[in-house]
Image (spheres, grey):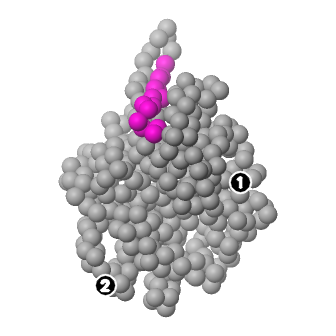
C-alpha cells in the first residue's frame, strides 16, 4: 500500500513522541512492504509563533489531501494568556471542524502488566475494556460564546447546542462498534436538567430502537457515570456521549490504566482522513527532557493503520509489540512507580525491536 500521512508534532513533548511513532511506522512499512509518505506540518503554539495562526492553510491543505493524520499535542504556558487573540487549542478545534471529524474513539483497556500502576484496586480494573465514543464537533465547545460587563460586573456565556443529525450520526458509530464487541451500548447525558440532553436522549433512543434493536442499551446520567467509572468500570462496553461530558469522562477513565501516556484516540468523520493522537496534553514540564512516554502515540499510529488504512494485521503487530515491551518490564518514568525507567527514545527502540522479533 502507498499512503500519504501528515505528522503534526505540535508543542511540548509532541515532537519527541511523534518522532518515535514515525520510526515505528517506518519499520512497519519496511516489514510489510508498504510505502508511507510522511509530511510534517505545524499546528498549535508553534504555528502561532511561525504564522500567527494555530492552523495555517499550509497545514490544513495537505491534511485535507492526506490518507491519515497523526498528531502529538498542542499548547503550553507560553500561549496561556486568556487575553490572547488566538490560542493553540483553536487549531485543534478548527481541524476537527474543517475535516468533519465528529466521532472521537477512546479505548480504555488496562494492560495486564500494569494493573498495579493504577490508583484503583486490582479487583476493580481487571477485565476492563471500554470504548468511549465522544461527539467532537458540536456542543458547548462550538456554540456561541461571549463576555460583557453588566451592572459593574463581568458576565460570560457559552452556548451548548446540538442538532438531531449530529446526535444520530455519532450514536450510529457507537452502535456499530457495540455490535462488533459485546453488544452493550450506554448513552450518557444530563437529561434531568439540560434541554440539550433531553434531545440527546430522545434521539439516541430512537436510533437504537429503529436501527440497532439487537443491542443491550441503557442510559446513565453523567454524574452517576463519573462514579460508576471508578467503582464498577467492568459493567460498560461502548459508551457514547456529547463533547463536554466525553472530554471529562475520558480523562477520568484514563486513570484506570494508571497513566495518560498509554491511551490513544481516533477522530473520524464520514469521509476523508482520520486524525489520531494520544489523549494526553503537551506536558510542558517534561518537554525536552527525553522522558515522555511515547506508547500512547505509537498506539495511536496503530489505530490509524486499522481505521484509516485498513491494515489490521499491521496494527495488531504494533499492539502486540507494545504489550511485549511492557510485559518485559520496560517502563518510562510515568509508569515506573519509582523503579528504574528508560527514555522516550529507548522505549521507541524497544517497540521496534519487539516488532522485528514478533513479525
* Magenta-colored span: 155-168
Q: Residue at x 44, y 77 (%)?
A: 313
Residue for badge 1: 235
Relative to 132, is 235 on the left or the right? right
Horizontal and vertical percent position of residue 148: 42, 18
Between 213 and 191, the residue placed more toward the observer is 213
Q: Residues within 10 Å of mark 2 (few under 14, many from 20)?
A: few
Q: Residue at x 21, y 49 (%)?
A: 57
Looking at the rendered structure, which numbered label has been put on residue 129?
none
Horizontal and vertical percent position of residue 122: 77, 65
Q: Is residue 161 magenta?
A: yes
Q: Quadrant of residue 163?
A: top left
Q: Quadrant of residue 127?
A: bottom right
Q: Is residue 320 magenta?
A: no
Judged from the image, the secondary structure of the residue bearing numbered disc 2 is loop
Relative to 38, is 161 on the left or the right? right
Nearest to N terminus: mark 1 or mark 2:
2
In the rendered view, tell whether residue 2 sits above or below residue 156.
below
Residue for badge 2: 33
Between 166 and 180, the residue placed more toward the observer is 180
Q: Residue at x 46, y 88 (%)?
A: 359
Judged from the image, the secondary structure of the residue bearing numbered disc 1 is helix
Relative to 358, is 214 on the left or the right? right
Amino acid at each position: 500500500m502507498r499512503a500519504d500521512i501528515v505528522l503534526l508534532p505540535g508543542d511540548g513533548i509532541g515532537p519527541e513522541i511523534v518522532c518515535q511513532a514515525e520510526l515505528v511506522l517506518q519499520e512497519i512499512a519496511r516489514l510489510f512492504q508498504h510505502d508511507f509518505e510522511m509530511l510534517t506540518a505545524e499546528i498549535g503554539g508553534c504555528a502561532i509563533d511561525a504564522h500567527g495562526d494555530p492552523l495555517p492553510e499550509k497545514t490544513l491543505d495537505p491534511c485535507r489531501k492526506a490518507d491519515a493524520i497523526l498528531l502529538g499535542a498542542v499548547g503550553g504556558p507560553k500561549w496561556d494568556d486568556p487575553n490572547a487573540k488566538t490560542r493553540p487549542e483553536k487549531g485543534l478545534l478548527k481541524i476537527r471542524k474543517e475535516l468533519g471529524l465528529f466521532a472521537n474513539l477512546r479505548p480504555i483497556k488496562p494492560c495486564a502488566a500494569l494493573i498495579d500502576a493504577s490508583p484503583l484496586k486490582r479487583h476493580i480494573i481487571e477485565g476492563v475494556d471500554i470504548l468511549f465514543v465522544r461527539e467532537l464537533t458540536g456542543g458547548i465547545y462550538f456554540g456561541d460564546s461571549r463576555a460583557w460587563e453588566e451592572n459593574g460586573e463581568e458576565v460570560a456565556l457559552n452556548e451548548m447546542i446540538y442538532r438531531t443529525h449530529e446526535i444520530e450520526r455519532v450514536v450510529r458509530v457507537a452502535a456499530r462498534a457495540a455490535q462488533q464487541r459485546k453488544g452493550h451500548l450506554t448513552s450518557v447525558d444530563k437529561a434531568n436538567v439540560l434541554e440539550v440532553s433531553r434531545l440527546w436522549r430522545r434521539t439516541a433512543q430512537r436510533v437504537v430502537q429503529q436501527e440497532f434493536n439487537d443491542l443491550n442499551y441503557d442510559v446513565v446520567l453523567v454524574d452517576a457515570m463519573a462514579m460508576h467509572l471508578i467503582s464498577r468500570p467492568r459493567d460498560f462496553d461502548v459508551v457514547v456521549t456529547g463533547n463536554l461530558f466525553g472530554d471529562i469522562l475520558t480523562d477520568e477513565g484514563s486513570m484506570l490504566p494508571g497513566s495518560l501516556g498509554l491511551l490513544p484516540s481516533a477522530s473520524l468523520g464520514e469521509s476523508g482522513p482520520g486524525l489520531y493522537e494520544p489523549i494526553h496534553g503537551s506536558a510542558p514540564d517534561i518537554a525536552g527532557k527525553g522522558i515522555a512516554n511515547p506508547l500512547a502515540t505509537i498506539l495511536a499510529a496503530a489505530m490509524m493503520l486499522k481505521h484509516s488504512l485498513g491494515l489490521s494485521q499491521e496494527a495488531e503487530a504494533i499492539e502486540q509489540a507494545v504489550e511485549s515491551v511492557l510485559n518485559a518490564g520496560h517502563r518510562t518514568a510515568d509508569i515506573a512507580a519509582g523503579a528504574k525507567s528508560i527514555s522516550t527514545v529507548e522505549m521507541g527502540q524497544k517497540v521496534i525491536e519487539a516488532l522485528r522479533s514478533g513479525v
